[in-house]
Image (cartoon, rainbow, N blue to C red):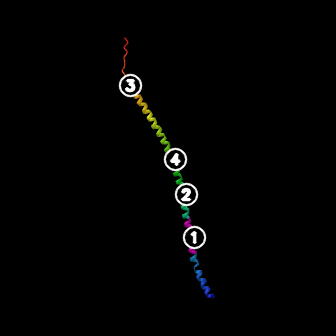
């Protein structure tokens, strides 16, 4: 290769340097944008995981509360049945005392 050919090749190569530099800067910006997007996605994922954890905790508390309320309802139902039975007994006794003949003592 002659000197003038070498010079021409060098000048052609040198003329592409700004273009290659510009491409490199664009790629660098894209990488930065992608890294920012990845960071946002990680943050969103972390927030969602925290929300899921809170929801699971709330669900467990609600299940416990529901079970306790079921026990209380059963206890109240038993109390109501017992009271109804007692009311029936008292009502029956009252009816018996009304229907029993009453004797009047006449003390003269």
Residue appearing at x 48%, y 42% in the figure: 70
Within 10 Å of disc 4 (Cα), the crowding (few <14, some 14-19, many 20+) is few
**Residue 86 at what x, y percent from top left?**
43, 31
Residue 18, label in figure: none
Disc nearer the start of the sequence (4/1): 1
Figure quadrant of residue 13: bottom right
Within 10 Å of disc 3 (Cα), the crowding (few <14, some 14-19, many 20+) is few
Along the line of sight, which residue is nearer the eye, 95 or 54?
Answer: 95
Q: Main secondary structure of the magenta part?
A: helix
- Asked if labels 1 and 4 touch by Cβ distance under 8 angstroms, the answer is no
Q: Secondary structure at mark 4?
A: helix
Q: Which residue is mark 2?
A: 46
Residue 94 to residue 65: above or below: above
Q: Which residue is mark 4?
A: 61
**Residue 27 at what x, y percent from top left?**
56, 71
Figure quadrant of residue 7: bottom right
Q: Secondary structure at mark 2?
A: helix
Q: Which residue is mark 1?
A: 28
Task: For marks 1 and 3, give the one nearer the viewer.
Answer: 3
Disc nearer the start of the sequence (4/2): 2
- Asked if labels 2 and 4 touch by Cβ distance under 8 angstroms, the answer is no
- Distance between the alpha carbons at the discs numbered 4 and 1: 50 Å
Q: Secondary structure at mark 3?
A: helix
Residue 93 to residue 15: above or below: above
Q: Which residue is mark 3?
A: 96
- Asked if labels 1 and 2 touch by Cβ distance under 8 angstroms, the answer is no
């Amino acid at each position: 290769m002659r000197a003038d050919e070498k010079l021409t090749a060098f000048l052609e190569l040198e003329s592409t340097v700004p273009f290659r530099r510009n491409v490199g800067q664009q790629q660098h910006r894209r990488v930065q944008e992608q890294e920012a997007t990845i960071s946002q996605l990680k943050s969103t994922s972390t927030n969602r995981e925290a929300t899921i954890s809170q929801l699971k905790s709330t669900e467990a508390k609600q299940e416990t509360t529901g079970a306790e309320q079921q026990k209380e309802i059963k206890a109240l139902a038993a109390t109501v049945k017992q009271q109804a039975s007692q009311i029936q007994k008292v009502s029956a006794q009252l009816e018996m005392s009304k229907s029993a003949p009453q004797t009047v003592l006449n003390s003269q």
